[in-house]
Image (cartoon, helix red, strand yellow):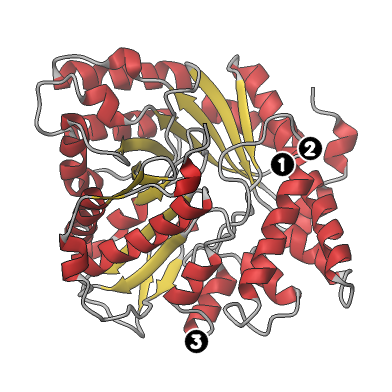
Amino acid sequence: MINRSEILQTIEMISEQHLDIRTVTMGISLRDCADNSIDACSNKIYNKLCRMAGSLVSVADEIEAEFGIPIINKRISVTPIAMVAESCNSSDYTPIATALDQAAKEVGIDFIGGFSALVQKGATKGDRILMECLPNALSKTELVCASVNVASTKAGINMDAVSEMGRIIKKTAELTAKKDGIGCAKLVVFANAVEDNPFMAGAFHGVGEPECAINVGVSGPGVICSALRGARALPFDDVAETIKKTAFRITRMGQLVAQEASKRLGVPFGIVDLSLAPTPAIGDSVADILEELGLGIVGAPGSTAALAMLNDAVKKGGVMASSHIGGLSGAFIPVSEDAGMINAALNGGLCIEKLEAMTSVCSVGLDMIAIPGDTTAATISAIIADEAAIGMINNKTTATRLIPVPGKTVGETAYFGGLLGKAPIMAVNPACTEAFIARGGRIPAPMHSLRN
């Protein structure tokens, strides 16, 4: 049961510092929906989602109204569709994407994730079919999100899949050109993808998960930033303590909401993801936190060190507030979804190379970055490979969500709307990468993968 006194302690954080529950995500297994017929499989999926998630939105709304805690998104993640659909006698899984989209609209959620494939060591027939139909599926649906895991510390990097994803991203952008390539904003390429991530676009319900689970993603960059204003001129030891204490309070609220949602829905509680997820709103920015620490602008020397300290302190504080921490847990630095990051990119403080360095210590990776529409598929693949290498070597999750905006170039802006925000088109190194990507094969796993 939620303790009302604990909720009252968060009133100021909610009303003045943009604290919210970023998402309540219901993970649902679809393994029992497999069928030889693509139509039968799609119908099974639609019916199961409507049955199991029918009350998700109403319950979340009840909790929000009863306790005054903003819950921004209600979402669903499902078993990677390549696994479910592989038994179908079909060369196109777009009907399943359509069923997912229709179910999401029927139950009233914001996004549904899991139109996904895990190909870090190689692709099956189902994986290849899903990847091939990604552009079509993402252009014909509104709420469906997709991901492909191309690398892991244990398996290395599947460079054939990396090469293919460059072409897929380009085609997806072309098919959604009228909306600045928004289809690519719903497509993530992972290394070391996790099975219980509640955040989109990379959420899926992993094979090690139960039949159904409730995962909650908290936020609160504004709360952290506000707390740090009272710690100006203090040494980093004290700064880290301030962040830890604040992260505890943020995560505690997420834990309480997750438990309440779990009880009311009759679904097991999965995890709390304590990531600092920004929004385009002023005052809700990870970039503002880093600048509050003393950086003149995000991207300046010291940015990676500041982000490393922030990420570590958030995890140390949050882990004391919940018995089940999972997902990605740390700090997100999506360019289009963070007002401070947008400002830094516009003012020349941030470039893709600096962002890449920062991703070695943050939660995810190169996230929501708009690039010129004429960027080649090989260059996109090479950027994906670089980010996957960071994840592989550091044994952490990294991701790439690049949006080559058709018809636009550096100096222009892509507009996506809502939480996806807007993004300045960032310059990409023009050096040729065709021969590198054309090699294909697999980059071997690092020595430290041999831990057994």
Say which element carries label 2. loop
Tag 1 residue: 69
Q: Tag 1: residue type?
A: Ile
Q: Quadrant of residue 175?
A: bottom left
For the residue pair 237 and 157, the one nearer the viewer reads as 157
Using the numbered discs, state the Cα–Cα distance from disc 1 to disc 2 in whole angstroms. Answer: 17 Å
- Locate residue 69: give its quadrant: top right
What residue sits 27% from the left and 69% below the top? Answer: 405
Position of 406 with respect to 142 (left or right) is left
Residue type at mark 2: give it.
Answer: Ala
Point 53% across, 26% down: residue: 56
Residue 402 visible in the current orientation? no
Q: Nearer the viewer, mark 1 or mark 2?
A: 2
Query: Does the residue at mark 1 contact the one at mark 2 (Cβ under 8 Å)?
Result: no
The structure residue drawn at horizontal position 47% and vertical position 16%, both measured from the top left corner, is 211
Residue of label 2: 321
Q: In this orientation, which residue lies closer to the viewer: 123 or 271?
A: 123
Q: Is residue 353 left or right of residue 18?
A: left
Regarding mark 1 in the picture, which secondary structure is present there? loop
Residue for badge 3: 348
Among the two numbered marks 1 and 2 on one chain, the one whose residue lies closer to the N terminus: 1
Please give left or right for residue 12 compared with residue 155 in the image.
right
Please say if 342 is above or below 12. below
